Image (tube, rainbow, N blue to C red):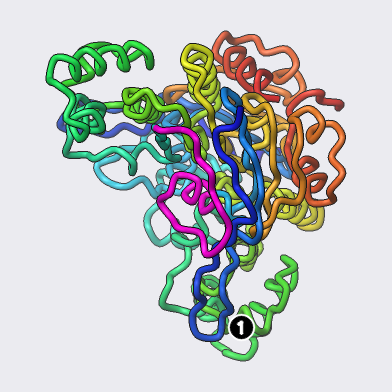
Amino acid sequence: MDILKINDLKTYFHTKEGLVKAVNGVSFNIKKGEVFGLVGESGSGKTLTALSILKLVPPPGKIDGEVLFNGIDILKMGETYLRGIRGSKIAIVFQEPSTSLDPVFTIGYQMMEAIYAHRDLQNRSRARKIALEYLDNVHTPDPERIFHDYPHQLSGGTKQRVMIAMALINSPELLILDEPTTALDVTIQAQILDLLDEIIEREKLSILFISHDFGIIARMCDRMAVMHKGRIVEMGDKADILNDPKEPYTRSLLESVKALV
Amino acid sequence: MMIVKCENIKKFFPGRKGVGAVKAVDGVSLEIKKGRTFGLVGESGSGKTTLGKIMLGILKPDSGKVVLTAKRTQAIFQDPYNSLDPKMKVFDIISEGLVLKKEPRDSVIKKVDEALELVRLPKNALNKYPHQFSGGERQRIAIGRAVVTHPEFIVCDEPVSSLDVTIQLQILNLLKDIQKRFSITYLFISHDLRAVKFICDEIAVMRQGKIVEEGATEDIYFNPTDPYTRLLLSSVLDVYPLKT
């Protein structure tokens, strides 16, 4: 059973310099409970694929194709429906936690905002309890303190834990992780990946994991796709692709990875 | 022969209200030999960059001594988007160091051409601006600007951290080639243990302003003795061998 099925997704930008085909006919599916990796170099179209899924592409971007979420084509739906989906049924965690959080509000305020937006709940103390519970779920050192902290008072690793807590707070079915550990030190990255392992196991989440790092994809994913210039050049089982890449582009990427091991 | 020697370097930055002083570099001694690549490894905030700046004389240490035998030094930074002036053409960027030393015009042109060839950029690059290049090409420009003055010692501060892995490999190989031809000494600052292993002869691991372990690259990589070094190494995610 596919939770997400993307058919011939195209995201084009009409610019003064001409037509930019950022995503150019991408198709893939994610099964329920699967961790699907999307790997590629910068500018290959990974992030725009993720943004297109939630119809969050900035203008003048135009999206075409099909994004079937539980069988419903998201791209055909209106803003009201989309607002109900974003941050609720489908949640996303971006690379840079410091730009994802609003610097002028406390962590607690921003988490409660996410709760109010999607749950029929206006009870402050109840929302606060849920927020604290989720801060605890992602093993932040001191949930009570962090609840009252502003983003700049937290380390990069803790901020990313908060972002993961916020993504999980409305029990999403699909979680999109866009380079969630790229801005972090390696030891912190290892901790966050451990946390994600635990959450995936516990919540039985379906994941779209975007990364430029083959090491992370190898560690986290079941199936994977390699993107290059807006297209998927190779897709399949992780072990097959990493051990026996068929496409020259995948091979050349993996040659560089091997040289730096 | 050694190029740089640091003796018990300390550099503290005053803290703000309620926060103590930041001990960026806290008693570091090390020696870098001529023609070698010395890796300074550590996570963000460990004091790597501060130490590099002290070696170049950009920052003054609070205490300790730096003995620098290199006459000409240079630096290459992480982010070529920030380290190149967007309003200057590539020719002006690369030649600036020579112009400041009042080199005659024909010698400047000759040396810039040589530097451009060395970093394998086409000649028409000289009349373009930084934004017209990719990240890897911009880092080549930064390297060209560094080598044009024929430095003996270059501090490379995370020179490949913002690049894709295929480009990383190209830039690391370029740095190796240049070193071979001119026997330049590098201080290679990085948090990326893979890049460090690829290019460095010796490594020092920094944590909270101190060096926790130091030695030949192979020794540190295969027989780390310090727990923090072990933690760093175990955090590296290798694709191979993949056992599933």
Q: Position of residue A48 (x, y in %)?
A: 43, 39
The quarter of the picture where the N terminus of chain A appears is top right
Marker count (numbered): 1
Residue at position x 53%, y 27% in the image = B185
Say if the magenta span includes residue B57: yes
Q: Could you tell whether A23 is left or right of B36 in the image?
A: left
Q: Nearer the viewer, residue B113 or B129?
A: B113
Q: Position of residue B191 (x, y in %)?
A: 61, 43
As drawn, A246 above or below B243: above
Say if the magenta span includes residue A136: no
Q: Position of residue A31 (x, y in %)?
A: 69, 38
Q: Position of residue B113 (x, y in %)?
A: 25, 13
Q: Nearer the viewer, residue B71 or B168?
A: B71
Dividing the picture into quadrants, the one containing residue B243 is top right
For the record, the magenta segment spans B49-71
Q: Could you tell whether B238 is left or right of A60 in the image?
A: right
What residue sits right under mark 1 in the picture?
A127
What is the chain identity of the residue bearing mark 1? A
Hey, which residue is sitting farthest left in the picture?
Answer: B105
As drawn, B192 above or below B211: above
The quarter of the picture where the C terminus of chain A appears is top right
